[in-house]
Amino acid sequence: MAGTAGTPGTPRVLRAMNDRAALDLLLEHGQLSRTRIGKLTGLSKPTASQLLARLEAAGLVLATGTTEGRPGPNAQLYEVNPAAGHAAGLDVTPQRIIAAVADITGRTVGRHELPTPGRRTGTPVVRQVTDALDGAVKAAGLTRGDIHRLVIGTPGAFDPTTGRLRYASHLPGWHSPTLLDELAAALPMPFEYENDVNLVALAEQRLGAARGHTDFVLLWNEEGLGAALVLGGRLHRGWTGGAGEVGFLPVPGTPLVRQVTKANSGGYQELAGSQAVPRLARELGIEDIPPGPYAEAAAALVSRAAETDDAAHRRLLQTYATRLATGLASLVSVLDPELVVLSGASLTSGGEALRALVQAELEELAASRPRLVVGDVREHPVLRGALESALATTRDEVFDTSR
């Protein structure tokens, strides 16, 4: 990626651009030889050699071995130094906080889960956050000072005009107007906060079903029903951070819910949220309702319905698909996205069977016809999105060799 005629910038800036291009290639491909890096970047062999020597001296790449089993002399291989930087992410729910630390290559090197049993806990939120983070940092064999950036994912969103968490009344202790200032005082590294479903969309865009897509909607259904909106390649958060809070959306087929923030629910949530699936199953005469939290019960029922060929389970899957498409029709009619990603266990557990039914129903209810896909990031997607967000900024800072 050498500079061309008309490219503005000093030699230092051009070197930094080439350095970053090489580092990104090493992140994408893993180990590469000098010759391969030169071909992929368009740099000459001497320039590629100088680049790698510079990055190795800066501690950003490591010489890791040589090629074997090929004609000619073995070539030195290089990779990004995993220890060049670390980032952390937190996934917050009313029941627990999961914290993880990743090295600069994206590999998770430490993880810790801290139970937070609702209103019964007497531990302040700031202490919960630092305890969860410290657990993951310790598991990684690091200290807080080794973490370049932290991203915290929560339900709802912090209103940028007030600093208070909105749309998440079920998250006790997180609604103080001074919470963000208290966290800033307690944490030694820069931190950001983001809506949990937005982070799932980021994970799918970076690693999963939405790779290469700049306009898509992600519909999430687990404890709550929500959406993330990616327009022109960027998350659309709305004026108060509430874009995508589709659980509050009034929809046909359910009574009109008023004072939705007090109820922490709305029409679409009541119609197609996870809590509606066990209730629907009982109405259809399905007696073997799985025990446990409703989100887990819903996922198990949807999975069984997708695999069981009897009338009651077929009806359950079809009715659930119609309910999901009812709310989606409003979203796609307004946004006209290229793609809709179905995520969260209450959606992904239905696999291709549920996806196909929702796609067919949506084509009956909306004029635009986006393609529906099932999300690929299944293991702690909120946490993965938080790490990806934190890593993006960390890499920009650590890989900037123009300074």
Image (cartoon, helix red, strand yellow):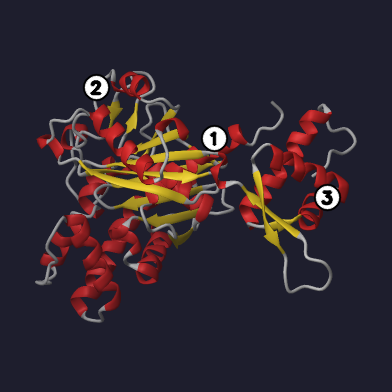
> Which residue is found at the position 24% from the left and 49% from the top?
223
Q: Relative to residue 339, is residue 27 drawn left or right?
A: right
Q: Secondary structure at mark 1?
A: helix
Q: Are marks 3 and 1 in contact (CB under 8 Å)?
A: no
> Which residue is found at the position 27% from the left and 35% from the top?
131
The kind of residue on which mark 3 rests is Gly
Give the residue pinned by disc 2: 176
The kind of residue on which mark 2 rests is Ser
Between residue 380 and residue 264, name the one nearer to us: 380
Give residue 335's position: percent from left, percent from top. Answer: 47, 44
> Which residue is found at the position 84% from the left and 33% from the top?
7
The kind of residue on which mark 1 rests is Thr
Q: Could you tell me how far apart the alpha carbons at marks 2 and 1 are, in whole angstroms?
A: 27 Å
Quadrant in which the N terminus appears = top right
Give residue 255's position: percent from left, percent from top. Answer: 17, 46
Give residue 365's position: percent from left, percent from top. Answer: 38, 57
Q: Relative to residue 350, is residue 147 drawn left or right?
A: right
